[in-house]
């Protein structure tokens, strides 16, 4: 299975086109570490600085979301490509990512991850600002069979690593969806894999971020990953009782909506304290 996440888009079972940039050989990497292989471009960001940032971000993300036994080195390492132009970026990740500046790809075979890759479109002002979001997807994949977290969790947690400005917009979208009546029911949110209307998109990302905040405040953040993993095996109602002592999805709906109304459009402080330069 291949799972690619591109900004606000998640494509499941994606097969690379023949025009995708070939995987570089070891000698082509600008710099490597225990967990990353970096390839940038002439005049682009410093490969050594980007490598340090990647290792630091990975460590911070793992400490927030994963238990100690899940924080080992990556094999295979995560390949990070930095693109100078939108044409280069789109050739690598596909036309579906035209409105994005970051993409992550996880490939798994029989429950084992065999490839980790991040593509970043460099911006002179924003740099590699999509890195925290995309690296979150890669970190979370370690805990789930075939590298596939539930979509609400994957995007909600990754969005928590975005800039305060982006998170504020998502919380605004959540609040507006609640006000207009367009908000998804929690049971829909937890099970959604494909959008059926355009207005679902802002509601989904805003609600996913809000729900992640709510659940992460109920216990240690690592328990959120335990919850999603338990839900995939035993169902959400049982997992809610076991992890959070919440009596099923209906009670979660009531408690989360009360929380979301009280928070309003203002974004709570993120559990992730870093932002890419």
Image (spheres, grey):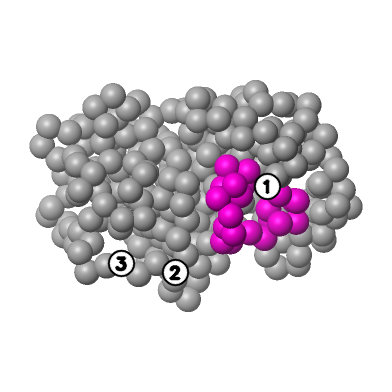
Discs 2/1, front: 2
> Does the magenta-highlighted stretch encompass residue 200?
yes
Q: Quadrant of the N terminus?
A: bottom left
Q: Secondary structure at mark 1?
A: helix
Q: Is residue 33 left or right of residue 85?
A: right
Q: Are marks 2 and 1 in contact (CB under 8 Å)?
A: no
Which residue bears the numbered disc 2? 13
Q: Is residue 260 left or right of residue 146?
A: right
Mark 1 nearby-residue class (10 Å; few <14, some 14–19, many ≥20): many
- Report the magenta residues as a range: 184-204
Which residue bears the numbered disc 1? 224
Mark 2 nearby-residue class (10 Å; few <14, some 14–19, many ≥20): few
Q: Quadrant of the C terminus?
A: top left
Mark 3 nearby-residue class (10 Å; few <14, some 14–19, many ≥20): few
Front in this rendered view, residue 26 or 12: 12
Inspect this view and state whether residue 210 appears: no
Q: Of label 3 and label 1, which has the lower sequence position?
A: 3
For the residues labelled 3 and 1, the Cα–Cα distance comes to: 32 Å
Q: Of label 2 and label 1, which has the lower sequence position?
A: 2
Q: Secondary structure at mark 3?
A: loop
Q: Disc number at residue 16?
A: 3
Inspect this view and state whether residue 269 appears: yes
Give coordinates of residue 85: x percent, y percent. Answer: 19, 42
Front in this rendered view, residue 105 or 172: 172
For the residues labelled 2 and 1, the Cα–Cα distance comes to: 25 Å
Taking the spot 37% from the left edge, 33% from the top edge, the residue there is 129
Q: Is residue 122 above or below residue 26?
A: above
Q: Are marks 2 and 3 in contact (CB under 8 Å)?
A: no
Q: Is residue 27 left or right of residue 225?
A: left
Discs 3/1, front: 3
Give coordinates of residue 199: x percent, y percent. Answer: 59, 47
Front in this rendered view, residue 71 or 171: 171
């Amino acid at each position: 299975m291949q799972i690619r996440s591109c900004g606000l888009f998640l494509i499941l079972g994606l097969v690379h086109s023949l025009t995708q940039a070939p995987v570089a050989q070891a000698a082509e990497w600008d710099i490597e570490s225990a967990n990353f292989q970096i390839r940038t471009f002439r005049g682009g960001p410093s490969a050594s600085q980007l490598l340090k940032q990647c290792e630091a971000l990975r460590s911070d993300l793992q400490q927030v979301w994963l238990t100690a036994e899940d924080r080992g080195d990556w094999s295979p390492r995560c390949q990070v490509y930095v693109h100078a132009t939108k044409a280069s970026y789109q050739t690598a990740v596909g036309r579906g990512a035209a409105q994005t500046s970051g993409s992550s790809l996880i490939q798994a075979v029989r429950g084992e991850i065999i490839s980790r890759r991040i593509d970043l479109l460099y911006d002179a002002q924003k740099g590699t600002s999509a890195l925290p979001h995309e690296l979150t997807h890669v970190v979370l994949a370690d805990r789930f069979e075939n590298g596939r977290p539930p979509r609400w969790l994957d995007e909600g947690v990754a969005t928590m690593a975005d800039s305060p400005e982006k998170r504020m917009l998502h919380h605004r979208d959540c609040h507006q969806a609640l006000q207009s009546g367009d908000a998804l029911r929690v049971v829909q949110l937890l099970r959604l894999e494909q959008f059926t209307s355009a207005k679902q998109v802002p509601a989904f990302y805003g609600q996913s971020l809000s729900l992640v905040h709510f659940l992460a405040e109920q216990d240690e953040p690592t328990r959120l990953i335990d919850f999603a993993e338990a839900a995939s095996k035993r169902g959400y109602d049982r997992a809610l009782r076991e992890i959070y002592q919440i009596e099923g999805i209906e009670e979660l709906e009531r408690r989360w909506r009360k929380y979301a109304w009280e928070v309003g459009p203002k974004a709570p402080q993120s559990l992730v304290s870093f932002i890419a330069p």
